[in-house]
Amino acid sequence: MAVYLRVSLVRHTVRQSSFKHLAQRILTAVGEARSELSVELIGDARIRRLNREYRKQDRVTDVLAFAVREAVLPQGKGPATNMLGDVVISLPTAVRQAREVGRSINVELATLLIHGVLHLCGYDHERGPREAARMSRREQKVFQMISPAPRLIRSAPQRQREVR
């Protein structure tokens, strides 16, 4: 099982080994221990562009999931690839949401990663209330399996302004 992590931001320092380990634990919890996963942490402007391009929604979102296996599987066949897909998370949005609901950024990132991985596994809360409830229950169960959320990021030191 491989987790590929790309961080396109400099404001926060991501603990990459902790993040990859968390992703591996989530894959194991959802029954995809042998799958590969790509995760990218990006900013609001880029996730808005992706959301506009792929979902026709011109707004910032917290997480997007792009299934690879679903795109390459012939009907009724087994996996043609071990790559489950890509999860893209907006780190600035995750930080804002964590503050709004009063939880740590570590819990928020773990929650968003679980959400994205479940989308890759075929869950889709947008199909209706029953599917949303089913996905929510599964998210909670997976979160319990991987708890506690590890420390994933630390903010970069603030630059001091020059006094003239």
Image (cartoon, rainbow, N blue to C red):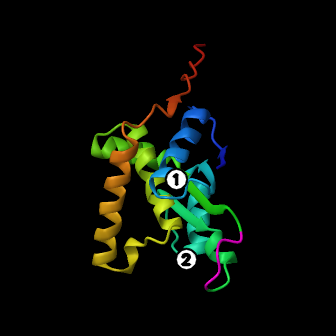
**Kind of residue at disc 2:** Lys
Q: Which mark, by number, is residue 27?
A: 1
Q: Secondary structure at mark 2?
A: loop
What residue appears at the point 33 percent right and 46 percent down from the top-left corner?
A: 144
Q: Can you name the residue that lies furthest to the top here? A: 164
Q: Quarter of the image containing the C terminus?
A: top right
What residue appears at the point 71 percent right and 66 percent down from the top-left corner?
A: 81
What residue appears at the point 56 percent right and 62 percent down from the top-left corner?
A: 48
Q: Which residues are magenta?
A: 76-80
Please give left or right for residue 100 compared with residue 18 in the image.
left
Instruction: Give the image location of residue 87, x and y in percent.
Output: 57, 57
- Would you say residue 135 sits in the magenta stretch? no
**Kind of residue at disc 1:** Leu
Please give left or right for residue 31 compared with residue 96 in the image.
right
Q: Is residue 61 visible?
A: no
Secondary structure mostly seen in magenta is: loop
The residue labelled by disc 2 is: 56
Is residue 93 shown above or below 19? below
Is residue 19 shown above or below 50? above
